[in-house]
Amino acid sequence: MIDSSSIKQLAGHPFDRRDFLKVLGWSGAAVALSGCGNTSIENGKETVVSYVEAADYVIPGVAVYYNSTCAQCDAGCNINGRVREGRVLKLEGNAASAINRGKMCGLGQAGVQHHYNPDRVREPLLRKGDKGETISWDKAYALIAEKLNGVSGEQVAFLSGAVSGHLKVLLGNYLESLGSKNLYVYEAVAPAVQRAANKKAYGTEMPRFNINKAKVVLSFGADFLGSWVSPVHFSQQYAQFRKGVDGQRGVLVQVESKMTLTGANADRWLVVRPGTEGILALGIINALGASGVTLSGDVAAAVQGYDKARVSNDTGVSVEHLDKLVALLKERTPSLVLAGSAAEGYAHGSQNAAAINLLNQVLGNVGKTIEASASVPFPQMIPAKGNTAALKTLNDDLAAGKYKVLFTYATNPVFTAPGSMKFKANLAKAGFKVAFAHYLDETALEADLVLPLDSALEDWGTQVPEYMAEGAQINIQQPLMEKLHANTQGMGDILLTLVKQREADKYKDFADYYGYLRGSLLTIKGALGSGGTDDDTFWDETLTSGIIKLAGSAEQLSGNASAAGLQLPAAAAADAQYSFHLIPSVTAYLRDGRHTNQPWLQESPDPLTTIVWDSWVEIHPKKAAELGIVEGDVLEVSSRTGSIRAQAYLFPGIHPDAISIPLGRGHEALGRYAKGYGVNPFQILDAVFDQETGELALHETRVKISKVGQRIIVVKDEGAAGGKPEQRRIALSKSTDQVKLSEEV
Amino acid sequence: MSVSNLLENWSQFRHFHPVDDKPHDPYKWAMSIDIDACSGCNACSVACYAENNIPVVGKERFQHGQQMHWMRIERYWPDHDFDFPEQGAEFLPMMCQQCEAAPCETVCPVGATNHTADGLNSQIYNRCIGSRYCSANCPFKVRYFNWYDYPTDETVWPAEMNRQLNPDVSVRGKGVMEKCTFCVQRLRAAEVTAKGEGRIVREGEVQTACQQACPTSAISFGNLVDPESRVHKQWQAQQVEMNVDEQEKDKEPGGSHLRGYRILEELRPYPSVMYLERVRESAI
């Protein structure tokens, strides 16, 4: 895609652009020849006439834009890469996208720093003792074939991050050719419990949430502006929600034990005792019933006993706030209730989520603010999902010495597996470990063979988002520039080569992954709604827009309003030895830590604490005063699994019985911008799992803290006043009864 | 220019734009930021790093206060005592306010920072001698000094990373001051294109990098003297006037329903950025 202004410039040009450039180019060459007696620039690497035969649309000084797909998280935002003189400079949003509508988060924009990262792996590396020895790709492929020789499918496993589209198809085909069923998909911070709870309540794992149609959003720890599901999409919905309908601004109430970015934007932030979110939800249903909302028999029975006094006592939310919230929910409809990872990270996480989803049913939101999502009519392309339950199975198998060959891709379990799993030790029991990697991360360092991957800005691909914003769509990923390093390969190309080792005949028509991708999409052209278009036109249009929008079939919501099986435990008792709940927080930019080596993300202050480049322990100021802790005191945080040390930060947005440490830092490898900065709370997580889904209960780890007697300066952006405006008119605020939003522009 | 001349004719030197002899025609670039929409996510700040070749200084230099973020998000808690921040935090995107009577301009010994005809507070890097008076005199603290020669610093733009640099924006060396430019490179390109076509830049034709990225569209940017521009309409609806130091809404006893305000207006820098107050629900 070329931008409109440069087209205009070209159209108005008095003579042919190519001739013009050739003239310029040759005269430039003549100058170079006579001027310095050298026919080359930059040490003879390039000839000065390079632009004469430049690729289409490469005009020196004019930026061109190509559409592609963001690969920094799984939300599938459509991006528009700014390219000049063959270099990609900046990633912007694709305005035609229903997901991000031209917008981008900081994590997505840092994708260029993934691409240009100085710490990328550049050559295939084979383990020689403690070191990696550079080998050729041919040798690497031969080695894989050799290691797979005589190995049964059951002895091969593939551990992958979330994959979708044609890569998932090819991966499935490869494993099939090996006779292996052992595909483990592991995303450390995926909303796995939520998917299961949604499936039960609505009949679909990921319905569409219409924040923009809700008058009240009640979110139980769903950080939809920061890291939850599809944050850029939800941020736009949120902006509409705040503007409201007829000037009535949407109201956001956030219930959680540690303030998230979304909580920081709430009209009312309600701090709850960790793990009691479900109790609060049932208490609200009970109170709604008491105020005249009709409850079905089994729901009424399920919430019986959750009277205000008990709920207030269990959760710590005052009766006054509970009353106001119930009145608001009753008066302003439709509303929307969201269950996020904070409510689900407990052994009874599924029950919490079920209670919260039940509230949506009682309020009649299903079908209004929760709708069926469109799905891609190619089930083989929809994302492969998985969380810690999958990793646990793999870990058990590894411990039993089951695997002779293990592949890993797009996931870093040595860094993200809970310490209690002892994954690193078990990984060593696999016979031959192949890591497909961008960086030498903690997992790649344990591998026997490391194969370097193209960056997402150099590679071809298709991606299917799990959360569909409007209609269904398939996202196109295309190279925005030439490969930076000669010896990296695309994951698709690698899988194609590997599958050809097994079934050469079946794939002989595809010279490379690009050919495979193009061929596959052309065969389903009709189903994609372009049956009448010729192949080249279809392909050009697809690459130009970067999105294939599909009619899609809407799944039906089941609307299961039953409270059957809902059984919440009483609020957790205090643990005398490990008195704090540990809340490992998922931040918007670092998530599970795979992108920590991108310096923009390291230096982008955490929105709530403004801390950069380091980890910290959030503790409530009152609790800190009680324990004699001040900012910068280094604390030893110990769980039953292990201990880590980090500096204290006094933070008012946290329950006094909890402390919080952000995830994503504390790398021992990955690269120069990640290694040695901060600590990794994954290491001290206990092995507690959700009772229904078997997924990791991220918030169940209990810890004790002690001062180690050292105090350091917290590196942060906020000033000495700790973020107090001190009576100056800086960030002003009004209440809704003081403004007339409908009269605004 | 003698000091006595300066003092006697102060009003001549200390004037703000537009003045009769230098009207804002056809452009006056201005911004409005709705802090009720702003979620504090930092996407604007990262966009600014990407667009304007801002160096990542690293942990140690950040600790020394040498960070270079032209666009930063300030986070505030309420002034009164509280146990829990029950109405959340307040986020405020802060960058150069492109003041019409900029305190930084009057103190520059070499005239490296001055006003452009289209209403920008410009910074001329190769005229700057690094006195840092401008930064000292800036009430918003949005000027950033290059304490090191970042372009040659291997930790900042090592090989390959330097290929991301935007060729439209100069990379600043040691000893010069820098700050938000309202993405002047984009403005100039749009102005030149429009001039070639014999018109002025249309509303929506040019965006700043922060505005373009903002996931909640909290930032509006445009030509304040163009009646069609969203910024013009917003300023007008909020009754915020460029050349006064006390707005209509502040004069109303008991407060007004208007949300528009400019930060530190009482110091009379006449900022080009209007903020819209955050709103919180009264029923909960």
Image: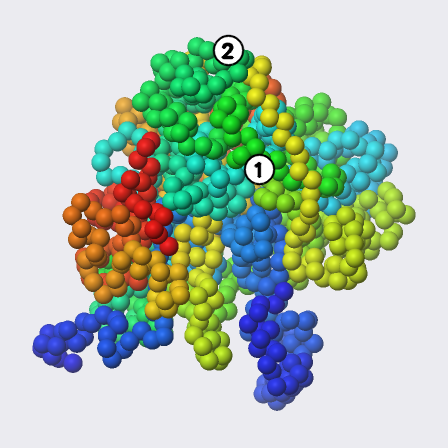
Q: Which of the two residues, B207 or A625, is positioned nearer the viewer here? A: B207
Q: Is residue A186 above or below residue B158?
A: above
Q: Position of residue A564 (x, y in %)?
A: 58, 15
- Amino acid residing under circle 2: Ala
Residue B193 in view (yes/no): yes
Q: Nearer the viewer, residue A35 or A8?
A: A8
Horizontal side, residue B119 vs residue A431: left or right: left
Q: Bin the neighbour count of mark 1 within 10 Å (Cα to Cα): few under 14, some 14-19, many 20 and up.
A: some
Residue A652 quadrant:
top left
The amino acid pointed to by label 1 is Arg
How far across and how far down the image is residue A598, in percent?
51, 50
Foreground residue among B78 and A447: B78
Point 77% across, 62% down: residue = A536
Q: Secondary structure at mark 2?
A: helix
Give me the disc on residue A301.
2
* Mark carried by residue B159: none
The answer to whether residue A271 is seen in the rendering is no
Please tell me whether mark 1 sits on a helix, a strand or a loop: strand
Residue A317 in the image, given as x and y percentages of width and height: 36, 22
Q: On screen, A295 above or below B111? A: above
Q: Circle 2 marks a residue in which chain?
A: A
Q: Which mark is residue A208?
A: 1
